[in-house]
Image (spheres, helix red, strand yellow):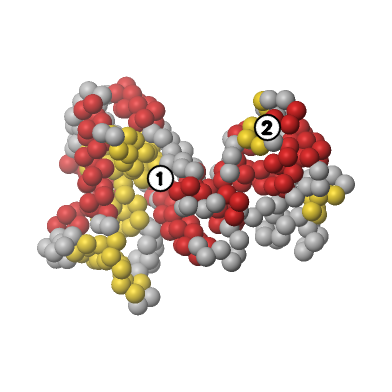
Amino acid sequence: MKKQRKTPIFITKLSKLVRRIPPNHFRKEEFQEQLRNHSSGFKGEQSLEYFYRYLPKDIHFLHGLRIQQDKYYFQMDTLLITPCFITILEIKYMAGHLLFEDQFFQFIRTYEGKEEAFANPIDQVNRQQYHLSKILDQYKLPSIPIETLVVMTHPSAIVESSPTYKEAKEKVIKSSSLQQKFESLARKYPNPILTQKQVKKLTRLLVKLSSSYDPDICELFQVKKNELAKGVFCPKCSHSIMRYEWGKWHCNSCYTSSKTAHIEALQDYALLISKKITNYECALYLNLSSSSQAYHLLRSLNLPASGTNRSRHYHLTPLLENLQ
């Protein structure tokens, strides 16, 4: 069984924010860097899909779990559940020379002549192990071994540890070693602790307890919503604003036309500004010449609505249902 891996809503919102922030905004580069970092992490998680095929077919895979324990949330990239043991994978997609050192328990990257220190992922995954064990105790599930691995997924990364850092040698692997490491753990824990029924119960419980990190991203990054660019972006040349004439959107740059380009703009509105919109707000946001144009566009989408006349709000949530 697999809990399907979807693009995290936080990354989707961040990409929309980067697109809607004007090019000359003083924090544009900061948001672009944030997006690159989060996207590369997700790319690393996706890259492991290839290596999962070499693991036993009866493993239960859970991705992107975020669970509250003792008032705080902890997050796990991937969880592998078997009747004999559980494995938490902390997945990193980082290029360069990566050093785990145990004098100060640091994780140091040297890349393109620049040396940087990052939070030690071994410490991160050990904290996840602690919180997961508390969850199992809380719900009175049988005590089952929980192993932790840090998987470095960038193909060109050079991974090294201090000679005395035994934990790094045991827990840090490259993607291609996942099968070998899993087989080693299977030999270490040959006896089933959970029945197949209990495995399914645990899987369902963790999925139920998990919730996405879905903040108001403008509030999080202290961006005023009136700073965001208005209008409908051209689906072909991406950053040109389209004009609406005779029932279609037209791009003056590449001459693309579209009847539905406003849908993505309204998705942006729902993710960044509000999940409901009036005719007047829609006309302003889409750069329409009248509220009546907004009325016809919103009505054509068959969105649920509440209120009457000028206070009528259209609810945009249905536009987000299949968003990746």
**Amino acid type at mark 2:** Tyr
Q: Quadrant of the N terminus?
A: top left
Side of 233 relative to 34 (left or right) = right
Location of mark 1 (residue): 53
Position of residue 137 measured from the top left corner of the image (x, y, whole percent): 21, 28
Q: Nearer the viewer, residue 294 or 242?
A: 294
Please report the residue visible at 55 percent of the width from the left and 57 percent of the height from the top: 18
Res. 73 image quadrant: top left
Residue at figure coordinates x 27%, y 54% from the top left: 121
In front: 127, or 63?
127
Residue furthest left in the image: 164
| Residue 43, picture quadrant | bottom left
Depth check: 184 or 321 in front?
321
Look at 72% across and 46% down and name the residue there: 284
Q: Residue furthest bottom?
A: 113
What is the secondary structure assignment of the residue under circle 1? Answer: loop
* Residue found at the far right of this picture: 246
**Residue receiving disc 2:** 314
Q: Residues within 10 Å of mark 2 (few under 14, many from 20)?
A: many
Q: Is residue 109 above or below residue 37?
A: below
x, y percent for residue 189: 18, 37
Q: Identify the image quadrant of residue 242.
A: bottom right
Quick check: 272 left or right of 95?
right
Q: Identify which residue, 274 or 98, lies in the foreground.
A: 274
Coordinates of residue 226 in the picture (x, y in percent): 61, 51
Q: Is residue 160 at all visible to an observer of this figure?
A: yes
Mark 2 secondary-structure assignment: strand
Q: Position of residue 59 (x, y in %)?
A: 34, 36
